[in-house]
Image (tube, rainbow, N blue to C red):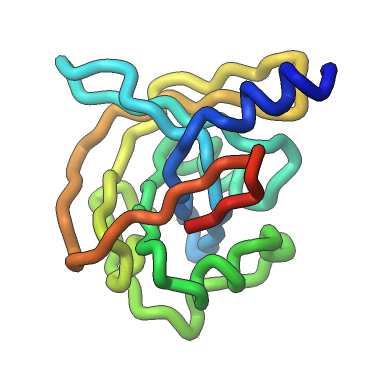
Amino acid sequence: MNGELSRVLGQIPSGIFLLTSGYDGKRSGVLVHWVQQCSTNPPMVIVAMAKGLPVEPLIRDSRAFALCRIAEDDRLLLRKFAQSPNAGDDPFETLPTIEGPSGSPILKRAVAYLDCELVRHIDLETDHALYVGKVQQGGVLNEGRPAMYMRDSGLVA
C-alpha cells in the first residue's frame, strides 16, 4: 500500500473496544479498533479482528462475544491489553467483571458494553477476520469519554 493511501485510511477514526469471550471456564480479551453497527433491526455489529488470537476459539465455541467500550483516560486497560494475553491465561483475574448473558466477561470499569450472539464469522484472505454479532444486551456502566484511535497520527485518546 502506498504512503498516501495508508495515510488516508489511517485518518478514519475508530473507537477502542475490548472484545471479550468466555467458554468452559476460560476467558480472554483483546483490544479491537474496527467496530461498526451494521443493522438496526435486529441490532447488529461487525468487528474486524486480527487472526490467530487466543480469544478466537472461545468465540467459535461459545458462539458469542462482548464489546466493552474503554474510557479515554483508562490507561490501565489500554496497557494491559496492548498485547494479546497468552492462550490459557485469564487477563481478568485482577479486574472486576460481570458475566453477560452470553457468558462473556464484561468489565465493570467500561464506559458501556454490548453482549452479542455470533451470527457470522467471515474468514477473509487477509490478516483480519470479520465477526458479526447480534446484540442481545447492552448498557452504559460508567460516565466517561470513549477512547478513540487514529493510525495516521498515532493518536490514542
Identity of the residue drawn at 71% across and 35% down: 51
Q: Nearer the viewer, residue 65 or 69?
A: 69
> Quadrant of the image for the N terminus?
top right
Q: Quadrant of residue 45?
A: top left
Q: Can residue 95 be seen by looking at this rendering? A: yes
Q: Can residue 21 be seen by looking at this rendering? A: no
Identity of the residue drawn at 44% across and 33% down: 35
Residue 57 appears at what percent x and percent y? 62, 43
Residue 61 appears at what percent x and percent y? 52, 40
Residue 72 appears at what percent x and percent y? 40, 63
Identity of the residue drawn at 39% across and 22% down: 119
* Vertical order, 48 against 32 (above or below): above
Residue 67 appears at what percent x and percent y? 38, 47
Q: Nearer the viewer, residue 147 or 46?
A: 147
Identity of the residue drawn at 43% across and 79% down: 95
Residue 130 lies left or right of residue 6; in this view the side is left
Q: Residue furthest right?
A: 2
Residue 82 lies left or right of residue 109; in this view the side is right
Residue 31 lies left or right of residue 8; in this view the side is left
Q: Nearer the viewer, residue 120 or 140?
A: 140
